[in-house]
Image: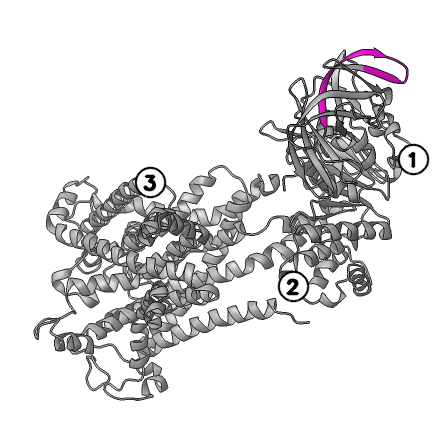
């Protein structure tokens, strides 16, 4: 039908210009300035200014100095994304197929906890997992944890915190995908495959792949840059890259180092996303 | 010239086109002249359409999807700009008028009721835009007419499909448009409701006396409701006239197949007399009245409706002087209750359909039985051999 | 055994509800702690019940000052981001222009970029343009509008794209001029989407830490206050704020839901 034809003319440009300008000036141009900063001579400072010396050595230096936080960030984010995928899939599937008329209410409940400040709810996890908290004491009581073992200040706590905080970013796209699946297809598959597990992996899972791809991306990307969870739930042994960048910028006043770390993080994420999207066979992100 | 042609098979051809008018009707009704819509991708949806709709008549544009009927309607509504041609309404040229400037209202296929307004405000919408006085009373009257007076303060989503349909009708009718356009308005309703709404819309049209232009792909709907049916195919009007005239005397294979069902048998013209044309049909001579011959060629399709065909045992005397074809074999029998549908293979290999009313006067035939077919010459028609015998088949009843 | 059978048949739903319950655990702790009467500065347990935290929210004036700043930035950046984003959404759905697909990409990218990268590149821009001495309210505002914009566009765009465009044709058919069509039909129908986008935008702005922390200079927003206070012991009033945020947002959602239900239920 020709009804949805878009209008041509200058109105479209006029409507688009303000937002485009804002994003160009405050999102695109800063990337340029970030890359430029990453090539400055690191011997300068914020006060004295920096010289542009195309100092590519910055990248080699920061990789050598900070490859561990890089690896940690990626690794924690990947684990958290996996946990989110499992938990989020169960939740999204339950809401889409099993919730009936409670669907909308449950969707609201999925988002509700995340209206509370990110930092406050992460602090709350700190309290729950603390050495004197009842979780640790109960686990010690049943000997799942030794008397000296702890939950807080471990990688596990950071991953758990990330998985918790970014869960809605997984659930919502998953739900959008799963909800579109005709339940009769699932019934037909249980009719054809008999085994519900085979039916799930042959029908439901492939059909929900777009949601899986966008959900994992929306979880992984912010998780890789996050350092709040590492700060509140980890220890100094678990410094992540976000932490380092923030510290180099604000505390150490070492903009070229911080900028090259940022550029590297972006490049790593872009590379991983491209490989992942290619392998998942879908170019459609949202 | 009026399109409200008298029924009957004999007076069709010169009455069907309706393009030669130019007198009183054009000053009063809707007139489309050379209307063409070509899309930027090169697709021509409507091709030089001429149509004259007298005031107060009910015309149906009937055709398969993609035939250009909806595009025609949308051009009249102003929702689509014609590539060429003119639209004249009540004497003034509205070809390039904006939708809100035309005295035309539309009942949309999906009703397009405003979900954020209640029924009353939906119906009042057009009056309020035109700053008409006395909105309250007019809306009440209109809701009475469509029997929704108790639903005035409900939202569209709270009404059933049939009720929403009536709101859409009321919302358009209340503006007393010069032409009311109905775009497949019953498509979303179930069969039973559709039948009763057909009668309801027909009743309302007679009551308010406005010009209705109705687009549909449902031949039964078109024939039930409209005074005049225009059958469209590939952007042009194939034939136009009263429903019975179209059915009894189709002028093209498309109309013959799209409206109901037809047997089309290839034949060679033997002679043309003043009132009758004789055709050789695979060795059998049949005659067709001249008024029902729509080809000048040496050959043509002899057409006959299945229910006009009589079936009998070999050598049995049938009440059909003139055209009798022996040598048929029954290949399929479907009992439909009021009638029986036979498929009969003829000596030249073609299968013909025969509807036999179950009056009890004739016996039923079984598969494999040898039979003779016959029909009265005045029911047959002769069509252009260059048209496809399959045109319009299987397009009529898709939903 | 019928009970075991019931559990098996509802296993997925029960697992889903368990996940959902788990997401509420920290919230429960926050609410509980808002009534805590702590025995020491670093709190790891519920020591006693008190209403003091609720009665004296601004016991630490710097917390309320930070809250006020967060509110002001949140409101202003929501206003600007919602306006610009809504205009852009209309352009993208309703208008055709050169560079439309590039514009779509430009809208998408900020949602896919990690906050730390956005924040640090913006900081390098501010430093390079000599604004490093003026970091504060306006730089935070600029940053917040930047990352809220995309979410506004996406929210409004989906509402607009999901709108039946025959409704606008019907309005035009019923004698509404283009501007009447917009204000009487289009805008009221898109408005819930705009409102949703504004709420999302405000909560993104109010809650942001990573980008803000890089571009705030000496200003302190509420999340930054929490960050700064946590080493020395967070005052229990932070939990009061957390509880209020939770309750208020739930209330907004519930009122919105009830409103739309009441409107769709018969008045007559």
Residue A238 is inside the magenta segment:
no
Against B384, residue C129 (above or below) is: below
- Residue depicted at x 49% and y 49%: C88
What secondary structure is marked by label 1? helix
The quadrant of the picture occupied by the C terminus of chain C is bottom right
Give the residues in magenta: B262-278
Left-right relation of A72 to C161: left
The chain that hosts pointer 2 is B
Q: Which residue is mark 3?
A: A281
Of C178 and A277, the residue lying toward us: A277
The chain letter for the residue carrying disc 3 is A
**Dot 1: chain letter:** B
Asked if marks 2 and 1 touch (Cβ < 8 Å), the reply is no
Dot 3, crowdedness within 10 Å: few (<14), some or many (≥20)?
Answer: few
- Residue at mark 1 to residue at mark 3: CA–CA distance: 66 Å
Q: Nearest the camera: B159 or C160?
A: B159
Do discs 1 and 3 belong to a common subunit? no
x, y percent for residue B133: 82, 61
Q: Looking at the picture, do discs 2 and 3 lie on one chain?
A: no
Q: Which residue is mark 1?
A: B24
Residue A142: % across, % down: 13, 75
Label 2, secondary structure: give it. Answer: loop
């Amino acid at each position: 039908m020709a009804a949805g034809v878009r209008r041509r003319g200058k109105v479209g440009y006029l409507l688009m210009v303000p937002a485009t300008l804002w994003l160009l000036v405050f999102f695109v141009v800063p990337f340029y300035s970030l890359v430029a900063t990453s090539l400055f001579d690191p011997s300068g400072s914020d006060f004295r200014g920096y010289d542009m010396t195309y100092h590519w050595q910055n990248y080699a230096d920061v990789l050598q100095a900070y490859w561990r936080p890089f690896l940690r960030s990626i690794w924690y984010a990947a684990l958290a994304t996996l946990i989110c995928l499992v938990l989020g899939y169960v939740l999204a599937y339950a809401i889409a197929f099993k919730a009936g008329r409670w669907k909308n209410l449950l969707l609201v409940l999925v988002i509700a906890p995340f209206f509370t400040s990110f930092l406050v709810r992460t602090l709350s996890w700190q309290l729950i997992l603390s050495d004197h908290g009842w979780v640790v004491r109960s686990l010690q009581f049943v000997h799942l944890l030794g008397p000296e073992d702890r939950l807080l200040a471990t990688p596990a706590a950071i991953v758990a915190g990330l998985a918790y905080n970014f869960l809605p970013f997984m659930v919502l796209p998953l739900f959008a995908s799963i909800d579109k699946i005709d339940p009769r297809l699932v019934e037909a598959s249980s009719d054809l495959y008999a085994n519900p597990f085979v039916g799930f992996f042959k029908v439901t899972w492939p059909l929900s792949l777009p949601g899986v791809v966008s959900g994992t991306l929306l979880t992984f990307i912010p998780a890789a840059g996050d350092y709040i969870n590492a700060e509140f739930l980890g220890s100094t042994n678990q410094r992540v890259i976000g932490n380092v960048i923030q510290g180099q910028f604000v505390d150490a006043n070492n903009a070229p180092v911080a900028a090259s770390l940022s550029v590297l993080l972006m490049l790593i994420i872009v590379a991983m996303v491209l490989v992942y999207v290619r392998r998942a066979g879908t170019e459609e992100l949202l | 010239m009026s399109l409200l042609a008298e029924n009957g098979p004999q007076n069709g051809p010169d009455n069907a086109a309706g393009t030669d008018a130019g007198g009183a009707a054009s000053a009063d009704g809707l007139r489309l002249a050379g209307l063409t819509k070509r899309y930027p991708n090169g697709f021509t949806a409507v091709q030089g359409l001429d149509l004259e709709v007298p005031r107060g008549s009910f015309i149906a544009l009937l055709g398969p999807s993609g035939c250009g009927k909806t595009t025609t309607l949308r051009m009249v509504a102003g929702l689509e700009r014609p590539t060429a041609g003119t639209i004249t309404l009540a004497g003034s040229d509205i070809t390039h008028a904006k939708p809100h400037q035309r005295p035309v209202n539309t009942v949309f296929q999906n009703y397009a009721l405003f979900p954020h307004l209640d029924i009353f405000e939906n119906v009042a919408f057009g009056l309020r835009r035109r700053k008409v006085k006395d909105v309250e009373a007019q809306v009440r009257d209109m809701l009475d007419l469509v029997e929704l007076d108790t639903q005035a303060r409900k939202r569209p989503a709270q009404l059933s499909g049939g009720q929403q349909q009536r709101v859409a009708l009321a919302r358009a009718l209340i503006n007393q448009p010069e032409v009311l356009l109905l775009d497949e308005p019953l498509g979303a309703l179930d069969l039973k409701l559709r039948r009763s709404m057909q009668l309801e819309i027909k009743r309302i049209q007679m009551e308010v006396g406005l010009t209705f232009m109705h687009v549909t792909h449902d031949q039964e709907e078109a024939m039930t409701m409209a005074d005049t049916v225009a059958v469209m195919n590939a952007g042009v009007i194939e034939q136009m006239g009263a429903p019975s005239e179209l059915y009894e005397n189709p002028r093209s294979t498309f109309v013959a197949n799209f409206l109901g069902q037809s047997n089309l048998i290839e034949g060679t013209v033997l002679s043309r007399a003043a009132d009758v044309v004789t055709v050789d049909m695979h060795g059998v001579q049949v005659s067709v009245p001249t008024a029902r011959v729509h080809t000048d060629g040496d050959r043509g399709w002899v057409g006959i409706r299945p229910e006009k065909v009589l079936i009998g045992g070999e050598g049995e005397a049938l009440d059909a002087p003139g055209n009798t074809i022996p040598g048929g074999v029954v290949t399929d029998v479907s009992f439909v209750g009021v009638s029986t549908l036979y498929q009969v293979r003829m000596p030249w290999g073609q299968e013909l359909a025969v509807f036999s009313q179950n009056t009890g006067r004739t016996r039923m035939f079984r598969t494999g039985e040898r039979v003779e077919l016959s029909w009265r010459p005045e029911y047959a028609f002769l069509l252009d051999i260059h048209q496809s015998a399959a045109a319009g088949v299987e397009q009529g009843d898709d939903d | 055994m019928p009970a075991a059978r019931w559990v098996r048949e509802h296993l997925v739903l029960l697992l889903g509800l368990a996940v959902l319950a788990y997401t509420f655990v920290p919230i429960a702790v926050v609410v509980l702690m808002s009534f805590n009467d702590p025995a020491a500065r670093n709190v790891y347990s519920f020591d006693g019940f008190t209403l003091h935290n609720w009665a004296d929210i601004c016991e630490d004036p710097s917390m309320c000052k930070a809250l006020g700043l967060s509110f002001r930035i949140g409101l202003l950046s929501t206003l600007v981001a919602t306006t610009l984003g809504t205009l852009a959404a209309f352009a993208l759905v309703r208008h055709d222009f050169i560079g439309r697909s590039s514009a779509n990409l430009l809208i998408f990218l900020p949602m896919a970029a990690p906050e730390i990268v956005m924040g640090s590149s913006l900081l390098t821009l501010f430093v390079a343009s000599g604004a490093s001495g003026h970091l504060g309210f306006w730089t935070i505002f600029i940053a917040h509008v930047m990352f809220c914009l995309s979410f506004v566009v996406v929210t409004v765009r989906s509402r607009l794209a999901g709108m039946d465009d025959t409704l606008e044709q019907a309005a035009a058919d019923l004698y509404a001029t283009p501007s009447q069509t917009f204000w009487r039909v289009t805008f009221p129908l898109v408005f819930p989407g705009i409102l949703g986008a504004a709420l999302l935008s405000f909560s993104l702005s109010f809650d942001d830490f990573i980008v803000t922390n890089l571009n705030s200079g000496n200003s302190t927003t509420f999340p930054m206050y929490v960050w700064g206070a946590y080493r020395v012991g967070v005052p229990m009033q932070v939990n009061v704020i957390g509880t209020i945020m939770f309750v208020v947002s739930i209330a907004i959602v519930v009122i919105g839901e009830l409103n739309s239900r009441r409107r769709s239920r018969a008045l007559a």
